[in-house]
Image (tube, rainbow, N blue to C red):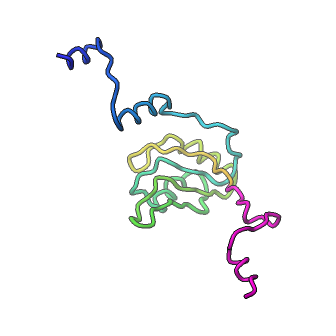
Amino acid sequence: MALRAAAAGRIPVTPRGLRAVFYSFSANVPLYQPRTGPPPEPSTNLYVSGLSRHTTSESLRNAFAEYGEVLDARVLTDGITGYSTCCGYVRYQTMEESAAGLEAMDGQFLDGLVIVAEYAKPKPRHLALEDDYPAGGYGLASVLDMSI
């Protein structure tokens, strides 16, 4: 009887246990969060996401080669299984070719899935690789400098 009343909406039902944790978390977080910050600068390198697990670098190159000279096409793969991680990079010869490839391939089907193409963001520099950053801890350089 209580289940029928709950299904009809007369009795509020609150989830219990682990389900309550996920319910409370997902109720406050929208499923789609728009990207923040400025869009990436136009470049000859494109980031492609939404690839199929069976997409290879060669099939990615062939799909984008219709819109200009592709210097490099690379699908990122899992080191253990060898399958695609569903994203990759395409590098064109010129900015005009990359703009044409981006315009033509964004939102198109490739190997049965809709892909998203956008300009690739530059890789951020790591602070520990900077010359002015003081190295701390017991790294290799500090171990070699130790005198016994």
Q: Residue 65: x percent and y percent?
A: 55, 56
Q: Is residue 88 above or below residue 38?
A: below
Is-magenta flag for residue 127? yes
Left or right of residue 122, residue 34 in this image: left
Tell which of 28 and 113 is nearer to you.
28
Query: What quarter of the picture does the N terminus occupy?
Result: top left
Q: Residue furthest front?
A: 148
Residue at 70%, 39% in the rendered image: 38
Q: Residue 27: x percent and y percent?
A: 45, 28
Q: Is residue 105 above or below residue 69?
A: above
Residue at 73%, 88% in the rendered image: 148
Q: Residue furthest bottom?
A: 148
Residue at 44%, 60% in the rendered image: 56
Tell which of 108 and 29 is nearer to you.
29
Q: Give the total number of marks visible in the rendering.
A: 0
Tell which of 84 and 35 is nearer to you.
35
Residue at 45%, 66% in the rendered image: 79
Q: Residue 6: x percent and y percent?
A: 26, 17
Left or right of residue 111, residue 146 in this image: right
| Magenta range | 123-148
Is-magenta flag for residue 54? no
Magenta residues, dominant SS class = loop
Q: Is residue 74 above or below residue 138?
A: above
Left or right of residue 68, residue 27 in this image: left
